Image (tube, coloured by chain):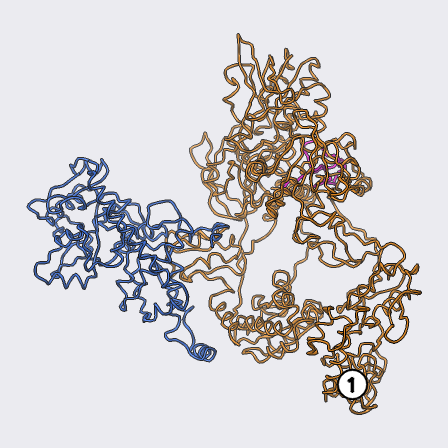
Amino acid sequence: MMIPVKDGKQVETLNNFFRSILERGIVDALLLPQGLFENGTYAHTLVKDPQKITHAQPFLPVLMNNGGTILSELTSGVNSTRIGAVLRACEIRALYELSKFNQVDLNNLFIIGVDCLGTMEPSDFAGLVGQKNFTAEQYISGLIEGKQDHIRTACRVCPYPRPEDADMNLGFIGTDPAKELFVDCSEEIADRLDLKKEAPPGEMVKKVDVIRKEKTELLDKLLSDMKGRFGSVTSLLNQFARCKRCYNCRAECPICFCNECIFLTNIFHHEPNDYIRWAERKGVLRMPYDTLLFHLTRLNHMAFSCVGCGQCSSACPNNLPVFELFQYAGKEVQNIFNYAPGQKTEDEPPILTFREKELEPL
Amino acid sequence: MSSENEQNGIKTQSIPITINRKKLQVPPGETILNAAKGAEIDIPTLCHNSALSPYGACRICLVEIIEGGKPGLVAACHYKAREGLVIETDTPAVRKTRRMMMELLLARNPESQTLKDLAKQLEVSESRIRRNEHDDCILCGLCVRMCRERMGQNVLSFAFRGDKRTVSPAFDRTSPVCIGCGACEFICPTNAIFPKDICQKPLVPILSDFEAGLGKRPVVNILYPQAVPNVPTIDKERCLHLTSDACGICETVCQAEAISFNQKAEMRELDVGAVILCPGFEVFDAAIRSEYGFGIYDNVVTSRQFERILSASGPSQGEIIRPSDGKQPKKIAFISCVGSRDQTCGNLYCSSVCCMYSTKEALIAKEHQSDIEPTIFYMDMRAFGKGFERYFEGARDRHGIRYERCLASRVMERQRTKNLLIRYRNEAGRFLEEEFDLVVLAVGITPSPQAKSMAKMFGVELNAHGFCRKVSFSPTETTAPGIFVSGAFGDPKDIPETVIEASAAAAQASELLASKRGTLTTEKTYPDENPFMVEEPRVGVFVCRCGRNIGGVVDVPAVVEYVRDLPHVVFADESLYTCSQDALEKIKSDIQTHNLTRVVVASCTPTTHASLFRDTIREAGLNPYLFEMASIREHVSWVHMNQPQEATKKAKHVVTMAVSKASLLQPIRINSFDINKDGLVLGAGLAGMTSALSLAEQGFNVHLVEKTENLGGHLAHIRFAIDGKDPGEYLNSLVKGVEENERITVYSGTDVKEVSGYLGNYKSLLKKSDEENDIEIRHGIIILATGAKEYQPREYLYGQNNMVMTQTELEESLSRDGGAGLRDVVMIQCVGSRDEEHSYCSRICCSQAVKNALKIKELNPEANVTVLYRDIRTYGTKEEYYLKARKSGVLFVRYEPENKPVVTETGGRLQVEVRDLVLGKNVRFAPDCVVLSTGIYGDNEHLSQLLKLPLTEDGFFMEAHAKIRPLDFTAEGVFLAGLAHSPRTMEEAVAQAKGAAIRAVTILSKDRILAKAEIPVVNAKWCSGCGNCIAACPYDARKINPETETADVIEVLCQACGACSVACHSGVSEQKGFEKRKIMAQIDSALTE
């Protein structure tokens, strides 16, 4: 069903909409991106009081934290509050993936998915916001038309413009966002919001499909370009030569959920003598040590479940192709195990199961 | 200067000599070779053998005398030490002459591997001398000496002189004196002598029993690879030493001095309270069925032989070849029922296993070589075991195994190709002939003659077939009190049933002897643990030679030398056999003497020997887990037999790895847990009551829970047994026994609401239907005997016409009114079995139909009984009743599942129409009564979830291992009996029930349960609770603690497999003794040069 945007004031419409979700008791608390700051970017806010919804900004073309990680924080332990969460596809996919590892409790969660055609790095966004003639709404209109300026690589090839498996969808693709927004939810919820349940218009479905198809092609192309780049230890070493081992990628990865990374435990704490001995053995030792091993270990642990949000690459101070590597290796292993990460299914991640002949394709 | 040594009270002189500037004291008369060997100085030899007198023919062992004798080159093997002798073994002259000799030898036989290896060692690449085409023999004289000195025969000698010199029997003719022992062939280094050229008598190889006569074996051999104990035996009938005092070489070559020719059989008297007879069976002698040509045609083999042909350790290393020409057969025929179900040879029973093993062998053959086309000729496909029907259907439908229903009448050989023609009559009645490359006879099971004499000795009666006679409803009880039976001595059976009966027989013995349990055991005590062992590691390394197993390849002294310099190593030594008693004593004393706190043994494999060495260091006051083992036999000397230098290098690495780990080892203390000694038995049918009674008889209290109000389950509906015994009477005695037993508490009309806890300590909530409050009970084990249900037919007008009934209902009516008025009865088999919904055989319905058919015939011999069947599966001795039924006029008509019988009713009259496959026409019956042989199905979903136990595809509970652990679950503490496992007969259910009881007693009889030592520990502070460990654990031993949301280890269930530690991303779960630091240290030292 469509909700009209009065006088082109999208934020106001959204504010009202989200307020009603809280007020009608559909959720007890709402995790909502709000544009609270001067430079135009947003932050996730956890709202209890409907009146504190003043700058609802779920569509801003910039990505801060992955909401999946935030919900992991919010739902671990005993959670009796029904939390609504306004999330993009990559965040929802991370959320479902985390739930398979007991890091998110999906009970008592109400997921509101929003359309997203791509995001840029916060620094780029801040730069654009300062410029004259820039408005986020115009920029998004450009994205609908197929422009790709400033968009992060991960978003450029993301085939999920509209989230799947959400309890409610809030979208603009296929509408004129200045005039109306599209809401999709169950009949029961629609009733409670005084909306009338309608199927999305055929044109809109078509538009979403076209974008999905284009982006899938872009992703396939990217992956085929990657084939030569990660083929051997040497090429990996070269690709990751600029790695400072700052662990930012690990910190930002929504799937990297360990309380303490094995690379910080005493297992990888070596004695000075060890280094000297290894240096002696090889004649020369790259320092800091274990750099490639770190990436390979993370690849080993996470590639099955990589949802392609690209936070790793955004977090990298040296523009390493972390996202590309994880997507490339991830797709390879996911195909072997016939597993698609980020879906709300009973499928267990391959890493949690063992079948006798699972490695036969290799 | 000579010195005097006192040895065994006798004064022996020793003299000083010098070899390679090393001063030695040796007995006078010792050869230089032996003296050098004692000093670890290597001299190459060829014609030397320690079992034979020295001869000096080959001159490879030349050494140079420098002083103390006539200077020059002499052969070390027979030159004797004299005082003041100075010898050099590696001078230029020695090397040059040895190489020259080598070239001369090579010229006689350049192909010999022994010579090639020796040449490589002496750095000779090829011979410059012209090849002697005349003879491969190098005239080393080993065979001549062997024959004369060891075999006492003197058949061989040298003949002629100069370049015509040769080894031959007298007059160069085959010798009548030669005994054909083959020793000359055995000792010849160049494969130049063949007993067939020497011996006048025909040579008869000793055939290996294990290879079913397809392979040969030596006189001294290990019976088969899995023999227990895995040691060689001497075949005393054929041993030349034991029969003629010759040879005795084994005694000379055994470095452990383990050969004793003086062992005699002795009589011992044992006081026992019970005896279990399990002498097994014998395979039917296929030659008796001479029309199949076994023993006449080369390419007719028995199934046992074919099993060896398929085996990777078999005579052809798993390559499928046929005996006549060693070629791969394409068409293979299996003929079933050879010596089973066979009146001509007096075996009236079914051997129960041949249908399935034929299918298995056919499948494996096809797996090995996919172009093989197996055909199985069979009478009835008896795939009645758990999961067997699926297996058979898979073989037939998916793997291309052809099944031909017939009894093959003859096998004939084609003379030229040695192919075989099988003549058979197919089901349509046509006689056919078909050619095969190989024929496998699926031979049956027969009682063994030894078992018969054993039965006589124990006063045990045998049945008409020659198997052990058993007490009714008690499948492991013989007619002699206190003497029990298990396995195929009772009747033919497959592996799971054999294992089940073994447990059942043990249970019966245990019931009898419960009051004496443990009275003959003594507990081993250990000294207190050394309090200093946790301090700085002091590693002791013991390197084993394992005779020549390791020492013959790896340079053991070099390894010991190398190890001494490793960090933390304070002591290193070698021994001939580290596992021998004296070597173990030495380890203990070395621990004391050198204050060792960590021990490394470099020898064979921890699988077989770690527990022995752990126990040894524990006896010396060390925690047993301060031990590490390095495998330098399996991982080094055996796999690198031909690369001694590389092997030595690898051995050093392997030991270094063990040392680096050992220095990080910490003591592990094992937790133990109390056991609640009560048992819970779920289900009070035949199996449940039997289990409960057995547990009670063995001295344990039992909670027996039954869902319904009555005890007895299906047994209450069985009116008569196939052998004429009265099940009702048995039921009454069983119920009485249960109710009167003080140890058994019966909860009837009761459901299990909740089960928590684990092995040794369960807590269950019971809900009685008429009571408000739950009953809480505590128990140490669970026996699941919840039974199964009878299929309720929807087909064949059941429920619409009163005269369509199930076998159970028929039985009821027969016992009530003697089946009055039953003149024409049609029985339909496989109703609710072997169909799409139930793709398994219900196992008992064929016997049930035969039983009831016989009963009808007994009550009214004039009655017509027709059984419509797919395969008659009266396995084992039940076959005799099938025969009896046929003889008494019961008609058996087969139908195909695609053409099921059609039951109709016209004017109240039933009519059955079915296609008769022999006549090729539809036949009609107008019976008074149609009896449906309904199947059995499992209704276990609820319990499976409650107890978290797995089910099979067919809805029955899944045991830990179909063959060898048929009564256990993977999760310890829960056992399985009766129909909940799979369909089975009363006797089989009783065996399972008793078996499950003794399986439970193996736990209940302990005072405490010990956890495993090397279990994982969780660093809860860092655990994210992701559950990877839970998914990885096959034993349900990991769970998330709901309060902390971190992973716990249920120590009592943990089997220390380590899967969870591997699965843990962040290294939070670490296996004790295998902490990542230790593994890293091992890997690291492996990479260090």
Task: Say whether residue B703 is visible.
Answer: no
Please tell me which residue lies in front, B101 or A69.
B101
State the image coordinates of residue B507 (x, y, percent, origin top left).
66, 42
The residue sitting at the top extreme is B907
Q: Label 1 is placed on what type of residue?
A: Gln
Q: Quadrant of the N terminus of chain A?
A: top left
In this rendering, the answer to whether B115 lies above or below A230 is: below
State the image coordinates of residue B454 (x, y, percent, origin top left).
80, 42
- Tag 1, which secondary structure? strand
The chain whose colour is orange is B
In this rendering, the answer to whether A146 lies above or below B955 is: below
In the figure, is residue B827 to the left or right of A270?
A: right
Task: Say whether residue A33 is visible.
Answer: yes
Q: Residue at x 54, y 52 (%)?
A: B674
Q: Residue at x 44, y 31 (%)?
A: B771
Residue range (magenta): B467-496
State the image coordinates of residue B275 (x, y, percent, origin top left).
74, 44
In the figure, is residue A188 to the left or right of B118?
A: left
Q: Dividing the picture into quarters, in which one does residue B596 lie?
A: bottom right
Q: Is residue B559 magenta?
A: no
Q: Is residue B494 magenta?
A: yes
- How many numbered discs? 1
State the image coordinates of residue B455 (x, y, percent, origin top left).
79, 40
In the figure, is residue B205 to the left or right of B401?
A: right
The chain containing the residue under callout 1 comes to B
In the figure, is residue B822 to the left or right of B263?
A: left
| Residue picked out by circle 1 | B25
Please tell me which residue lies in front, B69 or B1067.
B69
The chain whose colour is blue is A
